[in-house]
Amino acid sequence: MPLTWIESAELSILHRRRVRGHHHRDLALALAPPRLPSNPSSPRSPGRGMLHELLLALSGIPGQSLPPSKEKLEWAEPPMLPMATKFSQLFGRGTSPRVHEHITLSRTKVLYKQLLAWLLQGNLFDPYEEFFIVPAQPGRGHTTPGLHPPSMTQEDTSTFKSKAKRYRLKAEMVPGHISLKLAEKIFFIGESIQLFETDRKLEVQGSVLRERETEVYEKLAALRDLREFRVVEFERFVDSVRETASRHLHSLLLERADLKEELWIARNFFFLGRGELFHTFISSADGYLEQAPSATTQHDVRQTFSAACRSILQDDEKITKKIKVNVVIPNGDESKVKPIGWKCLTLQYSVPWPLHLILSEKSLEDYNRVFQFLITVKRTQLLLHKMWALQKWRKAESFSFVSQLRTHMMFVVDNLQQYFMADVLETQFSVLLKKLDQSTNFEELRQAHDIFLTAVSTQTFIDNNAVAQCLNELLSVCLQFCRAIESNSEQSFSSSKAVSSLALIFSRQSGLLFQLLTSLRNHHSGSHLTQLLLRIDFNRFFSTHGHEVASIV
Amino acid sequence: CLFGNTFPRIRERFNESQQSSGRERRARKSLCLNRNPKILNPIPIEPIVLTVLTVIMPCEMIMLQLGQCGNQIGFEFWKKLCAEHGISPEGILEEHATEGTDRKDVFFYQADDEHYIPRSVLLDLEPRVINNIMNSEYKKLYNPENVYLAKDGGGAGNNWASGYSQGQKLYEEVFDIIDREADGSDSLEGFVLTHSIAGGTGSGMGSYILERLADRYPKKLVQTYSVFPNQETSSDALSSVGVSDVVVQPYNSLLTLKRLTRSADCVVVLDNTALNRIATDRLHISNPTFSQINELVSTIMSVSTTTLRYPSYMNNDLIGLIAPLIPTPNLHFLMTGYTPLTTAADTQAAIRKTTVLDVHKSLQRIRERKLAGFIPWGPASIQVALSRKSPYVKTAHRVSGLMLANHTSISSLFQRALRDYDKLRKREAFIEQFRKEEMFADGLEEMDDSREVVQRLVDEYQAATKPDYLTWGMQQS
């Protein structure tokens, strides 16, 4: 490719510079691979080949290949940007200020052109892939978390299928004088506009910046026409536009799309807020889910779930359409023990447009992790209650070893459930709602929700391996106990070895849990830990008898 | 050939039938087994396929109101429930009741779209209270087939034995009603019985019904709201519920206590003395009247069922509510406390919602000040469920609290019952009233047996205060 992109004026400057031998040398050195500041992995690296050509141009060899027509020159202008950036970086301060300024300015002009398209229409005007925002290729490379929803599976009939194109921020393309933070802001604005413009589902949401379009344009033009690139002013400008977009998004989410209502729904389902619904579901679906899932399990469980929804929520068909249960059969070794259906159960939630901005795919994954844990707790609790009734029907007259074990188990599980539902979820959720009410822009909304999710996953210990494992084992020993009671008669069971070994495991695990929580509280003071410990050790049974429990057995 | 043709349809059907309940599944299975596939005709399969998947809703309850006291309490309870669910005295859903997230199905069933009928059976041996109910504005609320009045209307004369034997005689008729009601409920969790243990009908007939319920419905829970007689001398308690002016009350109570211990799963003790104390101390009613106490009882009943009647993340069924409270089969007597929580004149505090944090703080306070003693043989704590209140009822107090506790100190009530009984029994006072009934004609073994059961209950409560309760329990069996 000939050097068609250098303006004649510039070329003449470069030609003049050429006599400066040391610059030439600098440039040559700069081209040596280790110092090359370009990213070799980028699809079309603007660096090496072109720089080589530039070097040749400086040597004056291909001078005659200058484009003859003005028109072509204009066409040729845009790719200057990354080139010139590199160029100015290479030459650094050693270059004559005028040259530097000239290169910077022409670079800035291109940048403004791209920004204008991006900030006002959410479009890319970037035929040479020089802009730091590029179309996202699905499944390739690292993507900055954008505003766009993940692609959904085909069977999904969700209401949100954003038509908006997806973009990503390419960090390595951001020019040196624009900070990454600023670039992210720019990215955000264009993405929001994109979202409003292309997915015009609600009448009002369009023309975010329409009323401010002229103003924005004028400001941008003024900045462009400056002799130099003023970072501070530019940043102020970006901030003001971002603020408008963000406020607009905020009101769209909170008022039009009723984010709070949606969060209630998410809480009611993922966090089992509607206890009676999951009570019904768990008792009805246990037959399908207590074994390893088969090909039909998902279908059966879905039917059960929607039947439970129908009978409990009655008129709320809107909600049942939105939420489905999935039973994902893990594909792994045939030899491995397959997990039971309950472990494979997740919720599929079609987030209505544009709430995917908050309830992103990533956060739904977190919701599902909490859901899986909570449903195990609830299931264990229900089964233990069932055992209570079973012992009653079997006319177990007096207090026995089995009833003591059951009572202890029920105590721990009931209190865990109380803690998760009341101390963690109820509290964090009301904090979230309060923050949403106080928020004024989109970032605050997103942040409030992120904080909520983080708090929930921290306080439910799903990210704390030691505690999570201990809790899981504790619940699993309770479940084993229930199954053992169900399949044995009271007498044969209470004298069996199985019950004493279960009791041993249980007391070990509950003792371990108590120790883990106590040491956690001593290391990081968290009020949630104090709450949980207060609950399970209310009569100081664990702190005084914890070590003895095992010895009773 | 026929089989080949119908096969795909049968497969489809089979998949569908897997969604149906166990009973239908079993029915289908046996059908498949019994039929030779070669002559399988698709037509008989049709009716089985039609069923929609039935799911078990947590917690549907049938209320049995027995005797004067039981019916009065029950009446107040339904009044309160109607108000809370926005149901008019005629059983019609009020226009303002649009919120719709409450679970009316726990205590009501729907006759049609807006007509709600209480799952309630009204039983009495004398007509006065039931007639009052059936002449009130709520007369259309109840299913008239569920109201049962003994034909002779003579009552049980405050005699447990008379109530019990009339219960025996009326068994068929009474259980026709109860069975019909139970059959009509898809996912019946249990029965709630309201009665007093002092009089004749509630205690005697109640005892009989409790025994039969336990036989007929061994897998259903039986909860009672039992009004205990006033412990103070009868002279200063004339104005309150419970018929402590009944001279044979100690006999009645003891005989009923045996059934409450043996045949009920959970007894909510409505101790008249305690109720009076709540009324005077908490509600600042200096001389609580009969109806004020009844009102208080119905409040306790309705509040203790709020987590069942409103969607919530915990205690969605009766078993979830009582199982954690009752670690051991016999010790199933729960005390109640009720208080409207007022926060002085501090309006700021009154507007604030009661949160989990408040609960947590008060739990800590209770622990630090050792306001409650706990069993030494296992972990124990206080669980607090924050529940919504009805949006349709305006109350003077924003927040109110109900306590249900299983505390060993309740045994003092039973000890007192034993003492009162022993006093009468020593003198053989009024015993001839009982000897007249068939049950006691040949001797008073039933009384001795009841005394033993109650004594054992007291012993067990005392054993439960000691660290070696488990050893005690193992020795008993």
Image (cartoon, coloured by chain):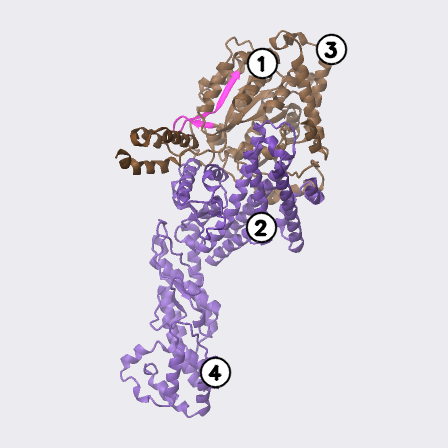
Chain colours: A purple, B brown
Q: What amino acid is at disc 2?
A: Gln
Mark in front: 4 vs 1: 1
Specify the segment rendered in magenta.
Answer: B108-123
Q: Which residue is mark 2?
A: A469
Mark 3 vs mark 1: tell me if same chain: yes
> Of residues A108 and A251, which is closer to you in this image?
A108
Q: Which residue is mark 3?
A: B427
Mark in front: 2 vs 1: 2
Disc ID at residue A92? 4
Q: What amino acid is at disc 4?
A: Gly
Label 3 Cα neighbours within 10 Å, binned few <14 / some 14-19 / many ≥20: few
Viewer can see residue A254:
yes
Q: Which residue is mark 1?
A: B164
SS at mark 3? helix
Mark 4 vs mark 2: tell me if same chain: yes
Instruction: Chain letter for mark 2, please.
Output: A
Residues at discs 3 and 1 in contact (Cβ within 8 Å): no
Label 4 Cα neighbours within 10 Å, binned few <14 / some 14-19 / many ≥20: few
Most common secondary structure along the magenta stretch: strand
> Of residues B2 and A58, which is closer to you in this image?
B2
